[in-house]
Amino acid sequence: MSSTIRTGRTVKRTTRAAATLAVAALALSLTACGGDDDNGGGDDGDKGGASKQPASTVTLPKLDGESLEVAAVWTGTEQENFKKVLAEFEKRTGAKVTFVPAQDPIINFLGSKIAGGAPPDVAMLPQPGAVKQAVEKGWAKPLGAEATKELGENYSQGWQDIGKVDGKQYGVYYKAANKSLIWYNAQVFENAGAAEPKTWDELLNTAQMVYDSGVTPFSVGGADGWTLTDWFENVYLSQAGPEKYDQLARHEIKWTDPSVKEALTTLAEIWGKKDFVAGGASGALQTEFPASVTQTFTGGEQPKAGMVYEGDFVQVNIAETKAQVGTDAKVFPFPAVGDTAPVVSGGDAAVVFKDSEASQALATWLASPDAAAIQAKLGGFLSPNKSVDASVYPNDVQKKIAEALVAAGDDFRFDMSDQAPQAFGGTPGKGEWKTLQDFLKNPKDVAGAQAKLEADAAAAYGD
C-alpha cells in the first residue's frame, strides 16, 4: 500500500477548527449545568422539547420485493438505534433490510463474505483507510447521481472529500464523532473540590485532587486498543501541531520521530502514574470500552473512577446507568497539551458493495437529514449532515457538540489511526492497537514502543 494513504483527497485544514470546536465544547460544559429531561437514551418521541424535522425532501424509489443487507460493527444500543433508521427506509420504499453484524477489522470480514460470494449490499466502514482499501480491491462501487446530489446538498466539502478516492465519491459519512472530550462524575469533582481543567498540567492537578479524595482519577478501556490510539492522537495533535499530525497520519515522518517520543512521554504522566488508572494497567487492559464508561457513573459517590476519556457517543453508555447527562455526568474538552486544545473527529461511511437501485437508494437515504434525525433523537449519535436541525438532539450537551461540528465546516482533523491501513490502525491485537496496549502496560519503554510502531507502520503502508 502506498505510503501516501489519504482520506480521499486530503482536505487542507488548520488549527482554526480546533479553536472553534474547543471553544464550543467548553461552552457546552458550562451551559450543561442544569438537568435534562433525557439522559441520552431516548425513544422515538420528541424529548427535551426537541422539535420535529421538516417534511421529507429526499426522494426514494419504490422497492417492493427488494432485499438488502447492511453490514456494520455496531453492537448493543448503537445497533438497535440504527435499525430504526433502516426500518423507516423499509417503510418508505417497501424494501426489506437485514442488518449483518460485522467484526473488526471489517475489511477482513468483508473479504470473507466476498470470497464466499455473499457481499453485503452496503457496509458501514469506520475508517477512511478501509474505504480506500475497498476501492483498491475493486469491492466498492461509486455513488450514483441521486446519492451524490443528496450528499452535495447536506454536507460540507470536507466531509464529501473524506469519502472520495481518486476523485470519485464512494462514501457517505452518516455518523461522526467528536473524540476530544473527557466525561466526569460531577459528584466526584464536587467532593474533591475540583474544577474543569483547560491545560494538561491542570488535568494532572485535577487528577491528583480526585485521587486525594479517595477516588481513582481515570477509567481506561484498554481492552479496546482504539481508545488508546485516541488518547495518543489528542496529545499528539495539540503538542506537535496539525502539520506534523498530517505527516504522521500519511507516514511521511516516522514513528521514531522526536515528536512521537514527546507525546508518549506525556501520556506516561497518566498511564504510568501509580493508582491513576482504575485497576492499574492490568485492570485497564481487561476493561472494554462500555465498562470504562459505566464504571465511572455507577456506585453512588464511590464509582471506580472520576473521569473517562472518549467521544460524544459515550452518552449511549451513560444512559445505561442512572446518571443523567448535564447533571450527574458532565464533560469538558480534552485539555491543551500545546498551544491549542485538540479536536479529533471520527466517522462511519456508508459504502455500496452491490451496485443496484436499492443499494444506491439506501446510500441516498443515509445522506439525508431525515435519516440522521431519527438516530440523533435517540442520543449517543452525531451527524456531520449540516441540514439536520440541531433541536432534534435529546439534550443540550449533544446539541452543542453537533452545532460545533457543523460550524467547523471543512476545518477539522480526522482520527489518525482511521486514516491508516487497517493492518496498522484498525486490527485488534496488531499494529498500533497492540503496541499502545503494551505501552500502557510498560509506559517507561518509550523507545521500544516507537520502534515497534514504526516497524508495523512501514509494513502496513508498504514502505
Image (tube, rainbow, N blue to C red):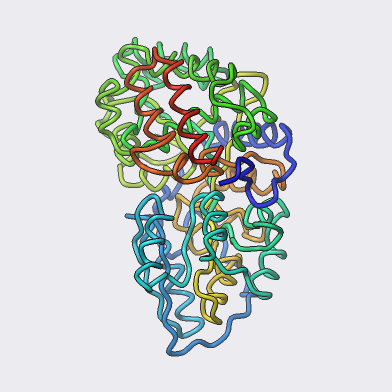
Q: Is residue 447 above or below residue 148?
A: above
The part of the image, by quadrant, that contains residue 108 is: bottom left
Residue 48 versus residue 102: which sits nearer the camera? 102
Residue drawn 48% across the image and 14% down it: 265
Give coordinates of residue 243: x percent, y percent: 70, 30
**Is residue 283 in view?**
yes
Q: How many marks?
A: 0
Give coordinates of residue 455: x percent, y percent: 47, 29
Relative side of 264 to 247, left or right: left
Residue drawn 71% across the image and 47% down it: 409
Q: Is residue 5 above or below residue 197?
A: below
Q: Is residue 426 above or below residue 25?
A: below
Q: Is residue 33 above or below residue 317?
A: above
Relative side of 339 to 177, left or right: right
Q: Which quarter shows the C terminus?
A: top right
Relative side of 321 to 332, left or right: left
Give coordinates of residue 321: x percent, y percent: 30, 42
Give coordinates of residue 378: x percent, y percent: 44, 57
Residue drawn 62% across the image and 69% down it: 143
Residue 279 versus residue 172: which sits nearer the camera? 172
Residue 349 versus residue 77: which sits nearer the camera? 349
The part of the image, by quadrant, that contains residue 390 is: bottom right
Relative side of 254 to 212, left or right: right
**Is residue 396 in view?**
no
The part of the image, by quadrant, that contains residue 386 is: bottom right
